[in-house]
Image (tube, rainbow, N blue to C red):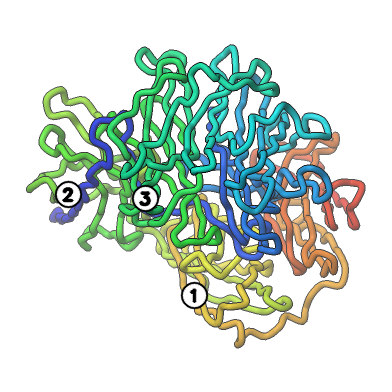
């Protein structure tokens, strides 16, 4: 057979750094903001300040938010929680907010500026209670303290506010622990709005004393300076850093409000040296071109990651968290994309794109890697550079993984003198996946109204149009095309595995709410295999043209699984009626072995009225009797469940 050539063009966008000589060189994430307010939820009005922590496995974000503007501006906010594996794909906690204010006690004004640390095995949180609507009011901010074993369930330090206030016009922004004591960095201003950053010391994190000898540690630049006014800061501490153990990022602006981020470093946390500043300018951003409300930084190895709460317009309703990443210590490519996700058959030219985040393009080689996910066979292709802004390479023989397969595209850079790999995009989750299998399509579905502004897509039928490939672990999710106007109320629908030309219908649905101001929007039906989106379909949604769903269950029900006995998987169906007080029910579907040990949690979320089905895969479990239990009602705690039912099933290998 004659070998066919595939031509791939890799275009590089040179992202010139915002910083020339300082320690950090941040690049803006191309899909900012990475966390923003939801639709018709507890955080649907605004999200504002945060604390970001990396616990060794995942990133945790604690952020303040509220769902309405019944109380003006910053009053009435609670604290929510979100997690991420990479710092830019965030998942909000189902049971948010995790820390709610008392509407009658000293916390009645809500919270701002949560600060979270983990010292030894204990999580610690400090939070501020604002005295009025104006965050710079000439009053005293009260501070609370709480501890937790898991970072989710918190216990307050007594019933009253703790510690001694640091004075009028003082807002603490960050706290670090240096191994022997706590250091608090706070912003303080006088009647002329002259801003400074000071430090206070504590041995227990509760009783604080200002360092009057060294304060202030950072001052504004004065008239005409870009940092005439300074506020909000984040500090990281590295005990083993031989040069500067402390690094600080703070927000500043000049005579007119266009915020910038500035950088400083210190050996002792009290005497600071400022670098070439500013390092980030909101006016140069693709997103958040007005001002910043908060800055958070995490350092892992030699890589810095930065989050800012920014506003795209002059209102906290438009606030969101943006993500920036620093690669000042290495050359790298980001935003690695295969522009055609499927139908790559060895004869059709395809285009791959990436961004090159380094100005010096002369001392390294760029390589592309295409790897088959099934066989782990990979092919390497060296880029032939024509100049510093683009490159072209030719694949003499495309990678083979049967005729229909799943592939990962990534890049890496080699130093031309040492032949050392100086950057691999796989190490930073900068890869893209595509497939020659399928496509898999939804060949039918029903779109119906539940009630008011709630709708459901159900009776979805998927078909695998592959000639040879079996496609595993399929699921379907829904989102709006521009991520606005829609709040999805439950998780996606699992479809299991589909053989070539096989189709499968699922009666359960995906419920969602639509903003009252939306007349027409475009939904995207995302079809995933092994949690990766490979195919998508557009659905133009007109709320006026959707008929109301009449077939809503009138009572809870848990059906017998089918098939039973089974090997290795079975389907469990159940129904949720309308819960008048909430409009939804808290649902938990759990599987136990014959000894009562929990072996699987199939469902643990709020669900709207409707009929549901879940697939239980017991391929890794032993033959025997299993018990499945449905808990549903206003809460899944045993004291408030309105419905609990169990049934038995038999798995035989």
Q: Quadrant of the C terminus?
A: top right
Q: Which numbered disc, 1 or 2, marks the residue closer to the eye?
A: 1
Q: Nearer the viewer, residue 212 or 465?
A: 212
Horizontal relation, residue 630 to residue 37: left or right: right
Q: Residue at x 37, y 33 (%)?
A: 263
Which is nearer the N-term, disc 3 or disc 2?
3
- Find residue 219 and report its horizontal and vertical position in percent: 42, 32
Residue that carries the numbered disc 2 in the rendered image: 395
Q: Quadrant of the N terminus?
A: bottom left
Q: Which numbered disc, 1 or 3, marks the residue closer to the eye?
A: 3
Horizontal relation, residue 172 to residue 338: left or right: right
Q: CA distance from mark 1 to mark 3?
A: 43 Å
Q: Which mark is residue 255?
A: 3
Circle 2 packing at 10 Å, graded few (<14), some (14-19), many (20+), is: some
Residue that carries the numbered disc 1 in the rendered image: 522
SS for callout 3: loop
Which is nearer the N-term, disc 1 or disc 2?
2
In the image, residue 347 above or below residue 229: below
SS for callout 2: strand
Q: Which mark is residue 530?
A: none
SS for callout 1: strand
- Find residue 395 and report its horizontal and vertical position in percent: 17, 49
User: Residue at the bottom extreme?
Assistant: 545
Horizontal relation, residue 408 to residue 521: left or right: left
Q: Residue at x 19, y 42 (%)?
A: 381
User: Residue at the left extreme?
Assistant: 386
* Occupied quadrant, residue 474: bottom right
- Residue 405 visible in the picture: no
Q: CA distance from mark 1 to mark 2?
A: 37 Å
Q: Nearer the viewer, residue 96 or 532?
A: 96
């Amino acid at each position: 057979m004659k070998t066919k050539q595939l031509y791939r063009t890799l275009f590089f966008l040179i992202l010139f750094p915002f910083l020339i000589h300082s320690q950090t060189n941040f690049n803006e994430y191309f899909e900012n903001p990475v966390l923003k307010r939801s639709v018709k939820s507890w955080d649907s009005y605004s999200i504002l300040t945060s604390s970001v922590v990396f616990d060794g496995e995942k990133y945790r974000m604690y952020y303040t938010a509220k769902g309405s503007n019944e109380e003006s501006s910053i009053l009435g906010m609670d604290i929510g929680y979100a997690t991420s594996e990479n710092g830019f794909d965030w998942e909000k906690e189902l049971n948010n907010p995790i820390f709610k204010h008392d509407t009658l006690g000293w916390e009645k004004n809500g919270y701002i500026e949560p600060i979270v640390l983990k010292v030894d095995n204990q999580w610690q949180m400090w939070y501020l209670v604002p005295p009025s609507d104006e965050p710079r009011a000439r009053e005293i901010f009260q501070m609370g303290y709480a501890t937790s074993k898991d970072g989710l369930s918190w216990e307050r330090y007594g019933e009253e506010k703790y510690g001694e206030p640091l004075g009028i016009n003082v807002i603490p922004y960050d706290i670090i622990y240096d191994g022997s004591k706590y250091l608090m960095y706070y912003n303080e201003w006088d009647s002329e709005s002259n801003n400074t950053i000071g430090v206070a010391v504590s041995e227990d994190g509760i009783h604080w004393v200002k360092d009057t000898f060294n304060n202030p540690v950072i001052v504004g630049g004065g008239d005409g300076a870009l940092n005439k006014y300074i506020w909000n800061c984040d500090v990281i501490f590295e005990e083993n850093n031989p040069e500067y153990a402390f690094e600080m990022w703070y927000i500043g602006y000049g005579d007119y409000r266009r915020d910038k981020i500035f950088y400083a470093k210190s050996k002792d946390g009290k005497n600071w040296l400022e670098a070439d500043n500013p390092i980030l300018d909101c006016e140069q951003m693709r997103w958040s071109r007005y001002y910043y409300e908060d800055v958070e930084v995490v350092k892992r190895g030699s890589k810095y990651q930065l989050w800012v709460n920014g506003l795209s317009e002059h209102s906290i309703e438009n606030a969101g968290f943006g993500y920036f990443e620093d690669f000042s210590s290495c050359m790298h490519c980001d935003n690695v994309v295969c522009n055609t996700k499927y139908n790559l058959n060895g004869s059709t030219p395809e285009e791959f794109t990436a961004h090159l985040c380094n100005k010096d393009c002369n001392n390294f080689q760029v390589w592309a890697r295409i790897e088959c996910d099934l066989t782990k066979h990979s092919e390497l292709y060296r880029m032939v550079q024509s100049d510093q802004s683009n490159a072209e390479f030719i694949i003499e023989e495309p990678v083979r993984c049967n005729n229909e397969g799943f592939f990962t595209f990534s890049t890496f850079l080699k130093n031309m003198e040492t032949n050392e790999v100086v950057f691999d995009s796989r190490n930073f989750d900068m890869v893209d996946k595509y497939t020659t299998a399928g496509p898999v399509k939804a060949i039918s579905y029903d779109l119906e109204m539940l009630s008011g502004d709630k709708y459901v897509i159900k009776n979805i039928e998927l078909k695998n149009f592959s000639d040879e490939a079996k496609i595993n672990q399929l699921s379907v999710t829904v989102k709006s095309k521009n991520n606005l106007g829609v709040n999805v109320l439950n998780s996606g629908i699992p479809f299991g595995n589909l053989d070539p030309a096989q189709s499968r219908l699922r009666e359960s649905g995906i419920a969602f709410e639509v903003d009252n101001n939306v007349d027409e929007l475009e939904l995207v039906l995302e079809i995933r295999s092994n949690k990766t989106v490979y195919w998508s379909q557009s659905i133009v949604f007109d709320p006026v043209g959707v008929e109301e769903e009449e077939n809503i269950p009138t009572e809870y029900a848990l059906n017998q699984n089918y098939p039973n006995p089974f090997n290795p998987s079975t389907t469990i169906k159940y129904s949720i009626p309308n819960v008048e007080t909430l409009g939804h029910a808290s649902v938990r579907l759990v599987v136990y072995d014959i000894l009562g040990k929990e072996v699987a949690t199939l469902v643990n979320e709020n669900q709207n009225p409707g009929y549901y089905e879940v697939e239980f895969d017991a391929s890794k479990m032993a033959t025997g009797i299993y018990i499945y239990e449905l808990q549903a009602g206003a809460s899944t705690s045993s004291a408030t469940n309105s419905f609990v039912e169990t049934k038995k099933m038999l798995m035989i290998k």
